[in-house]
């Protein structure tokens, strides 16, 4: 039924001559400084986009996250070689930027200006990187804390908005051509009902973000060039056509994206911030993944129960077919311009993520060939013409893709020597979505 709802909610048709850009959200290539097969394998699949996480640490002297306190190695040490290697491979890098500590994100009055100043430094230092995601899953306490005040009022949206808007203005001041995706919305959360909860509904969060925006100093200007969404199915055994389970609260999934489109439209219609659909705001699905049960050795720990990563729904066949459906469906939604699968290469810790197209040792899963072939062969909507979502009262007839679609690749930087990766003792920050407290939370 959800797919029927999605089809009925999409408006006028358009030609998708350029289609959707596919890539991965994975830090592995960054931590290897381009010395591993990461970028060559990525390009070999027909993917030319890589999102990497670059977190701001308010406790660090230069604002870059400290990875090894004993040696003072920070994330900045990995970026020059990574930017160079990506450029040489023809891969567009996107920096996913947000505060390292959730309580720092929950104090926007103190920290949003500092975050913006750090972004100025980052964008100036790496001018060839012209795509950013600002903020991440702000409706989850792992990323913005607190979510509520003592009276049960949602406060995370206002804090997130301050960081997003300040970051947007800082990046545009460095280069007006920088494309800024906004918020990386988590797909689930508790309904806002006047009580304090662990997290917040994505729909209520967007409503609160719109209320903050319309009442504040940024209301006369956009605060994002595109909307970034994370439509993970939770659990992953949820049928693709259902979108997501709502057992833990309101949620959206791939097949129910019109629900979040509507919420964003309701929050920002009539303002300077363009909306999805009538406002032709582009949409990126910057994190989405289906995990598999490894068939090889080298993995450690134990899989987290309750996520549907078991039996048939943890198989390589299931992952491959889910990704195939996703690629086809993305080409039919004219608002979607970018899709990044979460992980190209599995993580070794079973408590982390095994949603990659490769197992450890770069052994391809069944999904590698399926994704490669589907990207190459399905460049337009396979069932009809791709369509933009329209709110119920809208009858817009535009057939054009968003003019601001970030398709241009940054110029290749000068070739730099590729350094060997640092010692394995350096801890890698693991970026992943938070789950409801009723289910175990995988280790970040």
Image: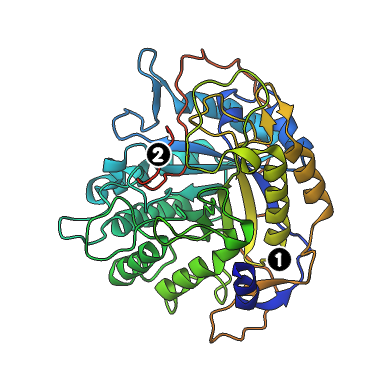
Q: Kindly identify which residue carries mark 1.
A: 332
Measured as percent of width and height from the top left, residue 398 is found at: 67, 79
Measured as percent of width and height from the top left, residue 162 is found at: 32, 56
Give the structural element (helix, strand or loop) at label 2.
Answer: loop
Q: Kindly identify which residue carries mark 2.
A: 440
Res 18 quadrant in image: bottom right
Which residue of the protein is positioned furthest toward the left in this rendering?
Answer: 150
Of mark 1 and mark 2, the one earlier in the sequence is 1
Q: Is residue 329 visible?
A: yes
Res 17 quadrant in image: bottom right
Q: Above or below — where is 369 with respect to 259?
A: above
Which mark's residue is nearer the viewer, 1 or 2? 2
Q: Residue at x 39, y 30 (%)?
A: 65
Q: Is residue 409 visible?
A: no
Which residue of the protein is positioned furthest toward the right in this rendering?
Answer: 377
Q: Residue at x 15, y 55 (%)?
A: 150
The quadrant the N terminus occupies is: bottom right
Q: Residue at x 55, y 25 (%)?
A: 31
- Do the residues under discs 1 and 2 have CB atoms within 8 angstroms? no
- Residue 97 is marked as none
Q: Above or below — where is 439 with respect to 168?
A: above
Res 390 quadrant in image: bottom right
User: Which of the two residues, 87 or 120, is positioned nearer the viewer here?
Assistant: 87
Q: Residues within 10 Å of mark 1 (few under 14, many from 20)?
A: many
Position of 429 with respect to 28 (left or right) is: left
Q: Above or below — where is 367 with respect to 351?
A: below
Measured as percent of width and height from the top left, residue 183 is found at: 44, 54
Give the structural element (helix, strand or loop) at label 1.
Answer: loop
Measured as percent of width and height from the top left, residue 2 is found at: 59, 68
* Marks 1/2: CA–CA distance: 34 Å
């Amino acid at each position: 039924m959800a797919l029927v709802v999605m089809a009925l909610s999409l408006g006028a048709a358009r030609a998708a001559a350029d289609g959707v850009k596919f890539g991965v959200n994975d830090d592995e290539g960054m931590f290897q400084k381009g010395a591993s097969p990461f970028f060559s394998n990525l390009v070999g699949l027909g993917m030319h986009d890589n999102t990497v996480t670059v977190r701001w640490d308010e406790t660090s002297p230069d604002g870059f996250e400290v990875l090894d306190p004993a040696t003072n190695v920070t994330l900045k040490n990995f970026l020059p070689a990574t930017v160079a290697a990506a450029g040489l491979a023809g891969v567009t890098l996107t920096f996913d930027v947000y505060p390292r500590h959730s309580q720092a994100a929950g104090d926007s009055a103190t920290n949003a200006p500092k975050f913006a100043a750090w972004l100025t430094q980052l964008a100036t230092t790496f001018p060839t990187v012209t795509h950013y995601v600002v903020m991440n899953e702000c409706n989850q306490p792992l990323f913005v804390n607190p979510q509520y005040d003592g009276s049960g009022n949602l406060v995370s949206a206002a804090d997130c908005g301050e960081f997003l808007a300040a970051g947007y203005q800082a990046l545009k001041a460095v280069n007006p051509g920088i494309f800024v995706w906004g918020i990386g919305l988590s797909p689930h959360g508790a309904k806002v009902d006047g009580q304090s909860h662990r997290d917040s509904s994505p729909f209520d969060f967007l409503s609160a973000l719109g209320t903050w925006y319309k009442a504040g100093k940024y209301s006369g200007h956009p605060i994002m060039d595109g909307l970034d969404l994370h439509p993970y199915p939770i659990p992953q055994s949820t049928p693709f056509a259902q979108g997501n389970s709502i057992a833990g609260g309101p949620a959206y999934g791939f097949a129910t994206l019109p629900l979040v489109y509507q919420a964003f439209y309701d929050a920002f219609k009539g303002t300077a911030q363009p909306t999805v659909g009538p406002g032709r705001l582009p949409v990126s699905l910057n994190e989405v993944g289906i995990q598999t049960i490894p068939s090889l050795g080298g993995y450690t720990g134990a899989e987290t129960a309750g996520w549907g990563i078991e039996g048939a729904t943890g198989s390589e066949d299931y992952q491959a077919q889910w990704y195939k459906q996703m690629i086809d469906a993305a080409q039919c939604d004219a608002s979607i311009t970018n899709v990044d699968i979460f992980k190209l290469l599995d993580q070794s810790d079973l408590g982390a993520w095994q949603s990659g197209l490769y197992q450890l040792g770069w052994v391809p899963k069944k999904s590698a060939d399926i994704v490669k072939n589907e990207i190459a062969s399905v460049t337009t909507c396979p069932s009809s013409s791709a369509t933009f979502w329209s709110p119920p009262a809208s009858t817009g007839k535009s057939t054009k893709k968003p003019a601001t679609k970030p398709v241009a690749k940054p110029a290749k930087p000068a070739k730099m020597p590729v350094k060997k990766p640092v010692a394995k003792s350096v801890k890698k920050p693991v970026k992943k979505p938070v789950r409801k407290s009723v289910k175990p939370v995988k280790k970040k």
